[in-house]
């Protein structure tokens, strides 16, 4: 497989491409995406259900006894479960986008193979796809680290005013980090979808070149 | 209305398929603006943590809530713009395939594949002589995506104003009421924005289906169309549940805001997670929509190879 950057106007040429003699199939992130999208989807639903159940228990406790160490523990645990759900659902969305990109890559190569073109031209991973992958990993960390800390801090709450205040402070800081994580995840998803636009543009150009071989 | 939406999602006549997408650039720019707002709000939270002991953290937390949720909403708006760009590009791709397919397909043996239902590698499909008409859910998606996004964005901005008002209030009763309004309104807006995104994904599925049918009909082969997969049916179901939860949390927040609840603290304790679940369920429906798009594309590439290889 060789790498080439075309510079002419009428071919698949504004793009960095891999040239090979057969379809390249899906790359590793796309294969991972195909396998993990549904497990992540199920994990997300479980996380949301767990978070809501803990919240209902906490609401009952608040209604009966007011703020206590129990309600603070449940606050941390509930947020932990809820954001396991969000981390999983964002991961599932990212994997589903990777699966779509995989279909374009594998399908595009196979179509060129079927026609018997001299070379199979495949778009190299665009910068937007790299931002998508790196952003996804950063965002995952920004959500999962607070999730772990929520469970750690939940175990550290005692029934003193100082402890309850410290628990509240910790919750507020973790909330801020989680929010940044959610925003980074959403932006990385935007970059993943933007990659699909680039792939479609490349494909529209490449398809018109196929009759010439 | 539908015709006006079509002008946004169908390429304008003469649009150069080689040119980069404007929607892609606008969408990414909106995403980055939203990210900056969320980061500012996050930093605000770190500052507020130090004010817990003197009881003044709440004032900061109310505006950081409003700003961060507004930031998320703006990123989602950016995602929606990018999805519009995908729709435009899908139709440009259809035009390219229509032009190219007659030149690259095998001549065929003069026979056609029989009509009816069959099982493909990607699920059950139908074979017909002409392109199938649009499904009702696809018509609905094409009509609804824009109003949902517009209403969602307006609710989000209204909620941001309410959160800022709540942040400036000092009377505890007024604070609770204003902030309840802010939370309910902002998350209703978020749910609507995700609903708009889900409808755009439905429109993409419709474009893949209709475009595939158009191409096959134009080259005179049997039109093979994937039947609605189970993932698409689950997508519609989850989206409806998510939207209903989004509306329910809004109604319940109003209930608390109007002082109808004896213990608002207990209500807030489960309404917060409920509103998050509404978004979570909508996001889950989006996973299934994207999954279905992958399946439909896989079917479409297989069909292209079949037409090229056999001419029928």
Image (cartoon, grey):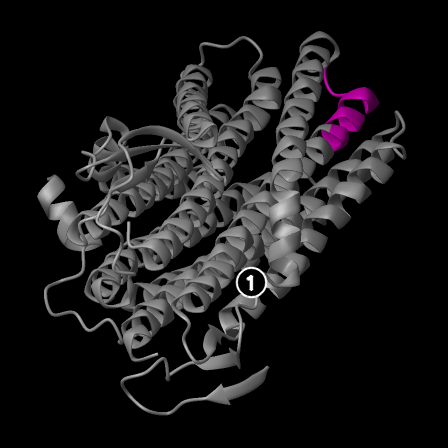
- Horizontal placement of B54 versus B285: left or right? right
Vertical position of residue B121 compared to residue B245: above or below: below
Q: Does residue A105 appear in this view?
A: yes
Q: Does residue B56 appear in this view?
A: no
Q: Nearer the viewer, residue B250 or B291?
A: B291
The answer to whether residue A68 is magenta is: yes
- Quadrant position of the C terminus of chain A in the picture: bottom left
- Horizontal placement of B227 versus B88: left or right? right
**Label 1 Cα crowd, 10 Å radius (few <14 / some 14-19 / many 20+):** many
Q: Nearer the viewer, residue B301 or B176?
A: B301
Q: Which residues are magenta?
A: A66-77
Vertical position of residue A200 compared to residue B215: above or below: below
Residue labelled with disc 1: A132
Protein chain holding label 1 = A
Hey, which residue is sitting farthest front in the picture? Answer: B109
Helix, strand or loop status at disc 1 = helix
The answer to whether residue B216 is magenta is: no
Badge count: 1
Q: Residue at x 53, y 57 (%)?
A: A102
Q: Residue at x 27, y 76 (%)?
A: B18
Q: Position of residue A62 (x, y in %)?
A: 70, 15
Q: Position of residue B12 (x, y in %)?
A: 13, 62
Q: Position of residue B204 (x, y in %)?
A: 32, 46
Q: Position of residue B43 (x, y in %)?
A: 62, 57
Q: Nearer the viewer, residue B259 or B303?
A: B303
Q: Residue at x 56, y 51 (%)?
A: A94
- Quadrant position of the N terminus of chain A in the picture: bottom right
- Magenta-drawn stretch, dominant element (helix, strand or loop): helix
């Amino acid at each position: 497989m060789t790498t080439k950057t075309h510079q002419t106007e009428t071919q698949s040429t504004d793009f960095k491409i891999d040239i090979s003699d057969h379809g390249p199939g899906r790359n590793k992130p796309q294969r991972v995406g195909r396998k993990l999208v549904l497990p992540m989807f199920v994990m997300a639903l479980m996380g949301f259900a767990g978070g809501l159940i803990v919240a209902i228990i906490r609401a009952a406790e608040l209604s009966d006894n007011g703020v206590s160490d129990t309600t603070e523990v449940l606050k941390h645990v509930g947020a932990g479960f809820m954001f396991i759900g969000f981390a999983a659902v964002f991961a599932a969305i990212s994997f589903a986008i990777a699966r779509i990109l995989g279909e374009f890559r594998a399908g595009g190569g196979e179509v060129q193979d079927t026609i018997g073109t001299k070379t199979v031209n495949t778009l190299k991973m665009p910068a937007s796809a790299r931002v998508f992958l790196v952003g996804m990993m950063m965002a995952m960390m920004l959500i999962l680290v607070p999730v772990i800390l929520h469970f750690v801090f939940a175990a550290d709450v005692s029934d003193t005013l100082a402890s309850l205040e410290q628990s509240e402070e910790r919750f507020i800081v973790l909330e801020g980090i989680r929010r940044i994580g959610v925003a980074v995840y959403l932006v990385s998803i935007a970059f993943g979808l933007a990659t699909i636009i680039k792939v479609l543009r490349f494909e529209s150009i490449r398809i018109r070149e196929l009759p010439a071989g | 209305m539908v015709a006006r939406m079509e002008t946004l999602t169908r390429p304008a006549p003469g649009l150069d398929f080689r040119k980069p997408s404007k929607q892609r650039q606008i969408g990414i720019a909106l995403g980055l603006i939203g990210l900056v707002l969320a980061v500012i709000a996050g930093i605000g939270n770190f500052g507020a943590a130090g004010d817990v002991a003197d009881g003044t953290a709440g004032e900061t937390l109310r505006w950081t809530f409003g700003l961060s949720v507004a930031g998320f909403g703006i990123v989602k708006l950016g995602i929606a713009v990018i999805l519009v760009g995908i729709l435009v590009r899908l139709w440009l791709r259809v035009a390219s395939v229509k032009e190219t397919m007659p030149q690259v397909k095998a001549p065929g043996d003069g026979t056609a594949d029989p009509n009816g239902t069959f099982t493909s590698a990607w699920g059950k499909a139908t074979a017909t002589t002409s392109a199938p008409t649009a499904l009702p859910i696809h018509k609905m998606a094409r009509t609804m995506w824009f109003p949902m996004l517009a209403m969602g964005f307006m609710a989000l901005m209204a909620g941001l104003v309410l959160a800022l008002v709540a942040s400036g209030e000092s009377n505890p009763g007024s604070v609770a009421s204003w902030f309840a309004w802010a939370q309910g309104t902002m998350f209703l807006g978020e749910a609507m924005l995700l609903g708009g995104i889900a409808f755009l994904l439905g429109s993409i599925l419709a474009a893949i289906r209709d475009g595939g049918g158009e191409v096959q009909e134009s080259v005179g082969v049997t039109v093979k169309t994937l039947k609605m997969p189970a993932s698409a049916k689950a997508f519609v179901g989850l989206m409806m549940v998510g939207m209903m939860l989004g509306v329910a949390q809004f109604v319940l927040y109003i209930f608390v805001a109007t002082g109808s609840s004896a213990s608002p603290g207990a209500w807030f304790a489960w309404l917060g997670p409920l509103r998050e679940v509404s978004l979570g369920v909508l996001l889950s429906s989006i996973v299934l929509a994207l999954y279905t798009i992958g399946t439909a594309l896989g079917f479409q590439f297989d069909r292209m190879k079949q037409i090229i290889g056999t001419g029928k």
